[in-house]
Amino acid sequence: MHVCGTPQLDMTDGGRDLVYLVTGGCGFLGEHVVRLLLEQEPRLRELRVFDLHLGSWLEALNSGPVQVTPIQGDVTRSEDVVAAVAGADVVLHIAGLVDVWGLVDPEVIYRVNVKGTQNVIEACVQTGTRFLVYTSSMEAVGPNSKGHPFYRGNEDTHYEVVHTQPYPRSKAQAERLVIEANGRKVRGGLPLVTCSLRPTGIYGEGHQLMLDFYRGAQRTGGWLFRAIPPSVEHGRVYAGNVAWMHVLAARELGSRATTMGGQVYFCYDNSPYKSYEDFNMEILGPCGIRILGTRPLLPYFLLFLLATLNAFLQWLLRPLVVYTPLFNPYTLALSTTTFTVQTDKAQKHFGYQPIYDWEDCRDRTVSWIKSRKRCPAPLPHGQEPKVGDPGL
Ligand SMILES: NC(=O)C1=CN([C@@H]2O[C@H](COP(=O)(O)OP(=O)(O)OC[C@H]3O[C@@H](n4cnc5c(N)ncnc54)[C@H](O)[C@@H]3O)[C@@H](O)[C@H]2O)C=CC1
Ligand SMILES: C[C@H](CCCC(C)(C)O)[C@H]1CC[C@H]2[C@@H]3[C@H](O)CC4=CC(=O)CC[C@]4(C)[C@H]3CC[C@]12C
């Protein structure tokens, strides 16, 4: 690992005394955060990993000095959340439903992403936990439904936020709750300190969609077909760097509460600005995949027609089956609207710098994809093996 600019750790108040709670700790990003916390947070005494579905890889983590406590629970159940939060110093609230395909009922997305976040905030207030880092998304801002570009913007860039879809709307609502909760008195009378991190599209080991593109291309003889103009920039960030920003934000929230409290931060690194497909090719190219065409093979209006047809079929088939193609009017809009960030707010406020440089991020992801060539017996319910599984 190439470590660029890891800041000095404040060890002034001695050994391991902190209890952290990570919600959604068994998901794609959550696993990166859990593993990095164990590596990079020397003050950690206990790490509680809360998730609806616990991964068996957690068992292997208990051999070190930190007590790793798996907690099976549901963020929509306030009693589960209160029990998990009680006694924690810091909460990293990562759990959420990611759905831009119409797979999940919008009401369920709201319940998990918004009410779940409200439950986490109330649990902090009730139990006296003072520090909360929330995983928001670039989608809390955009792209908006009008297709306005956001070109290398920052947290202060003026942008018309207009949401029509349940997922981005839920991330914006939850983020607002988290920001508004900053300063609320928690049990014991001290103020809650919160901040919100907004990753762009995350890639890295465990990124299921990248693997799906890889396997799809293998089925067509190693070819992908260009659909998006190469001039459209789509923001991407490596999961390890997203995790590092979480670790650092959590660590610094106490000593920099006045600066960081109630703030939002785009979550970025030095991954190149490219179109969604060209960026994927940075990973899939070294895995033997090629892309056909230097321009989109189909004109935009045909893509739009296809996406609309998919939306119509989804509506038509709804009583019989949940039809969720990758390609719909919203994912078309997402991939054909420029949305990239260029910001140093997190660097200025809490000293964030990516710990993995771009070549490292790329190579780690490439190795992970290649390792998936030798997939063992299928796991139940279409589950994929997890990042740390042996023999892959
Ligand atoms: N994947 C991406 O490109 C981006 C993701 N994000 C955000 O990052 C967070 C993590 O996303 P991913 O790791 O990609 O998704 P993921 O689906 O891999 O992980 C989410 C985790 O939350 C858990 N979870 C879901 N509902 C729950 C509930 N009711 N109670 C407890 N746990 C529950 C899931 O079991 C899963 O382990 C989400 O909040 C998402 O909105 C933000 C920006 C980009
Ligand atoms: C699936 C989309 C690409 C399909 C285009 C095709 C078929 C022409 O190749 C993905 C394009 C943009 C992605 C989203 C984006 O990176 C932002 C996100 C942020 C989040 O918080 C969650 C994930 C996502 C919505 C991400 C999902 C896949 C895309 C829609």
Image (cartoon, rainbow, N blue to C red):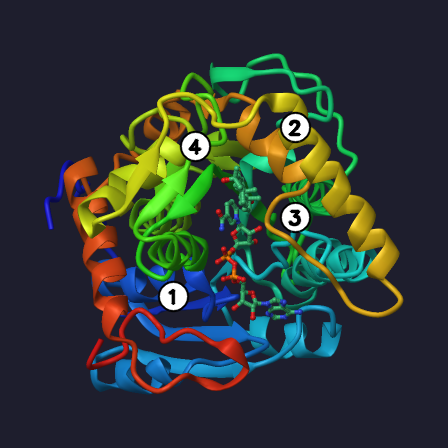
Q: Is residue 251 left or right of residue 118?
A: left
Tell me: is circle 2 under 8 Å from ligand 2. no
- Residue that appears at 79% across and 35% down: 164
The quarter in which the C terminus is drawn is bottom left
Q: CA distance from mark 1 to mark 3?
A: 22 Å
Circle 4 sits in a helix, a strand or a loop, which is it?
A: loop
Q: Is residue 359 left or right of residue 29?
A: left
Residue occupied by mark 2: 302
Q: Earlier in the sequence, mark 3 or mark 2?
A: 3
Tell me: is circle 4 under 8 Å from ligand 2. no
Q: Check contact, mark 3 vs mark 2: CB within 8 A.
A: no
Name the amino acid type tagged 4: Arg
Number of numbered callouts drawn: 4
Q: Earlier in the sequence, mark 3 or mark 4?
A: 3
Q: Earlier in the sequence, mark 2 or mark 1?
A: 1
Find residue 351 and report its horizontal and vertical position in percent. Answer: 29, 33
**Location of residue 260 with respect to 191 vertically, above or below:** above
Q: CA distance from mark 1 to mark 4?
A: 32 Å
Q: Earlier in the sequence, mark 1 or mark 3?
A: 1
**Disc 4 crowd, CA 10 A, few/some/many (<14, 14-19, 20+):** some
Residue 255 found in image quarter: top left
**Disc 3 crowd, CA 10 A, few/some/many (<14, 14-19, 20+):** some
- Residue that appears at 19% across and 58% down: 367
Circle 3 sits in a helix, a strand or a loop, which is it?
A: loop
Find residue 219 and report its horizontal and vertical position in percent. Answer: 38, 59
**Disc 1 crowd, CA 10 A, few/some/many (<14, 14-19, 20+):** many
Tell me: is circle 3 under 8 Å from ligand 2. yes
Residue occupied by mark 4: 226
Circle 1 sits in a helix, a strand or a loop, which is it?
A: helix
Residue occupied by mark 1: 31
Frontmost of labels 3 and 4 is 4
Q: CA distance from mark 3 to mark 4?
A: 21 Å
